């Protein structure tokens, strides 16, 4: 058994969860926030048998697309430790960050 942890941008969550449900996968949604842009993300915890990992990955590839977004730099006076960027920059966002881990034990109580 595997635990798939997928961190996706909030804009992609509805399409992703609809496809996962349609394919018969259960998951737990956890709200999260990205560190650089400080925008909303969702982390999905998906427990599946080994043979379903490829199916999950295909769903993620279809529903979580990359796009560009203009980032407004934070002022170093307000956010210590961050670099000061003098003007807005364009960054790539979206897609998914995916971790696949072995599960030693699983129980539904």
Image (cartoon, grey):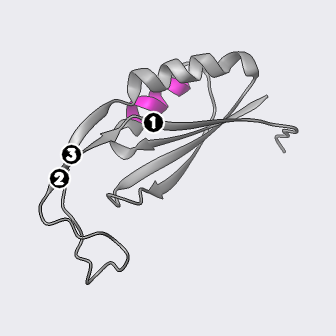
Nearer to the camera, 66 or 30:
66
Q: Are marks 1 and 3 in contact (CB under 8 Å)?
A: no
**Residue carrying label 2:** 89
Q: Mark 3 to mark 2: distance in Å?
A: 8 Å
Does the CB distance between marks 3 and 2 fall below 8 Å?
A: no
- Residue at left 34%, top 56%? 39
Residue under the point 34% across and 71% down: 82
Q: Secondary structure at mark 3?
A: strand
Q: Is residue 22 magenta?
A: no
- The span picked out in magenta is 14-21
Q: Is residue 24 left or right of residue 10?
A: right
Residue topped by disc 3: 69
Q: Decide: is 64 above or below 79.
A: above
Q: How far is the residue under mark 1 from the one under mark 3? A: 16 Å
Mark 3 residue crowding within 10 angstroms, few (<14) / some (14–19) / many (20+): few
Measured as percent of width and height from the top left, residue 99 is found at 61, 38
- Residue 77's x, y, as percent? 25, 84
Instruction: Tell me which numbered mark, 3 or 2, is placed earlier along the sequence.
Output: 3
Q: Earlier in the sequence, mark 1 or mark 2?
A: 2
Residue at the spot x=53%, y=26% of the render? 20
């Amino acid at each position: 058994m595997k635990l798939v942890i997928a961190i996706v941008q909030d804009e992609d969550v509805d399409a992703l969860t609809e496809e996962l449900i349609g394919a018969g996968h259960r998951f737990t949604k956890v709200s999260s926030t990205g560190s650089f842009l400080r925008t909303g993300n969702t982390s999905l915890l998906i427990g599946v048998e080994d043979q379903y990992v490829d199916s999950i990955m295909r769903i993620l590839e279809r529903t979580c697309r990359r796009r560009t977004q203009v980032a407004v730099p934070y002022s170093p006076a307000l956010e210590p430790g961050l670099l000061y960027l003098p003007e807005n920059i364009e960054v790539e966002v979206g897609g998914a960050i995916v971790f696949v881990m072995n599960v030693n034990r699983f129980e539904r109580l």
